[in-house]
Amino acid sequence: MEEKYCNALKGRFPFRLGTSSYIIPDEILPNIRYLKDLVDDVEIVLFESDEYSNIPSPREVKELTSLGSDAGLSYTIHLPLDTALGSRDENMRKASVGKCTRIIERMSPLAPFGYLLHLHGDRRGISPSDDIERWREQSRKSVEELIRNLRPELFCIETLDYPYSLVDDIPEECGTSICLDIGHILLCGYDLGLYYAKYLEKARVIHLHGIKDGVDHTSIAYLQGDILDDLLSRLSVNAHIDRVLTLEVFSDTDFLSSMRILGKFSGSFAQGATQDKQSNPPA
């Protein structure tokens, strides 16, 4: 417990520092109580299937809202992965849009900083579909339907394992934001500098995690070379952009290790960080 509070970095950076809602082995609310004084944002990772659902009840949403308000905590909502927004099956695509819409309505009292969206293909890898144009068309249609009743920039379309150039016209034309997942980019061997040049300015949310033995979502202690220095330098130059940097890890060990490393950089950012957040409150 003492180590936990020694690593609190809330309000220490000119961006909102966050992590996932699965740091301790418990449900969402206990995780929020554990994290609320340590970080500025929590990514609420949601699942819904026939076997299991962790979608908060209206009562739990009310408590999350209260905890966030009292602690100055914002939320990003990771919409469920078990969706098929680009499916060629129109009924399946519409059902996926409906699932996301219901969750957005349920979580709306939290006034989320952003909604994280995966545009899955039919399979993993660099070629997500046998019919790329059809998949792109269906994905675009789903995004257009999702943004009808919400500010488009709140939707953050995430970089996955396929080249983001396959879908980057969708945020450009629909006005959505981007979730730049550094770990995914590195794991797949894409050019991180090119991704920064093309997408960093539109990245409302950035996911940061390390890779160990070919497995991502580990401590940033496993980031190689000057990747962390370079990223923080770029965020410093673009400090006027209101965004979240999420340590997307899923254990207390990886979280505390990552926080210790980031703590070494916090001194150079601390001055003016609080003032910047006050002048740029979460949307």
Image (spheres, grey):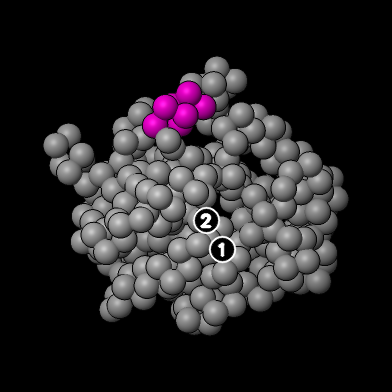
- Residue 227 locus on image (x, y percent): 34, 74
Reply above or below: 128 against 273: below
Residue at the extreme left of the image, as rendered: 2
- Residue 169 locus on image (x, y percent): 74, 71
| Closer to us: 101 or 193 | 193
Q: Earlier in the sequence, mark 2 or mark 1?
A: 1
What secondary structure do most residues of the magenta stretch adopt? helix
Instruction: Tell me: 265 left or right of 80.
Output: left
The residue identified by callout 2 is: 242
Instruction: Tell me: 193 left or right of 116.
Output: left
Reply above or below: 15 against 211: above
Would you identify the image quadrant in which residue 39 lies?
A: top left
Q: Is residue 68 visible?
A: yes
Reply above or below: 188 against 269: below
The magenta span reads 65-71
Q: What residue type is disc 1 on?
A: Ala
- What residue appears at the point 35 percent right and 29 percent down from the top-left corner? 33
Q: What residue type is disc 2 on?
A: Asp
The residue identified by callout 1 is: 203
Local SS, label 2:
loop
Q: Are marks 2 and 1 in contact (CB under 8 Å)?
A: no
Determine if the magenta segment contains residue 69: yes
| Closer to us: 177 or 141 | 177
Instruction: Tell me: 99 left or right of 181.
Output: right
Viewport quadrant of the C terminus: top right
Local SS, label 1:
strand
- What residue appears at the point 57 percent right and 40 percent down from the top-left corner? 112
Viewport quadrant of the N terminus: top left
Would you identify the image quadrant in which residue 71 lies?
A: top left
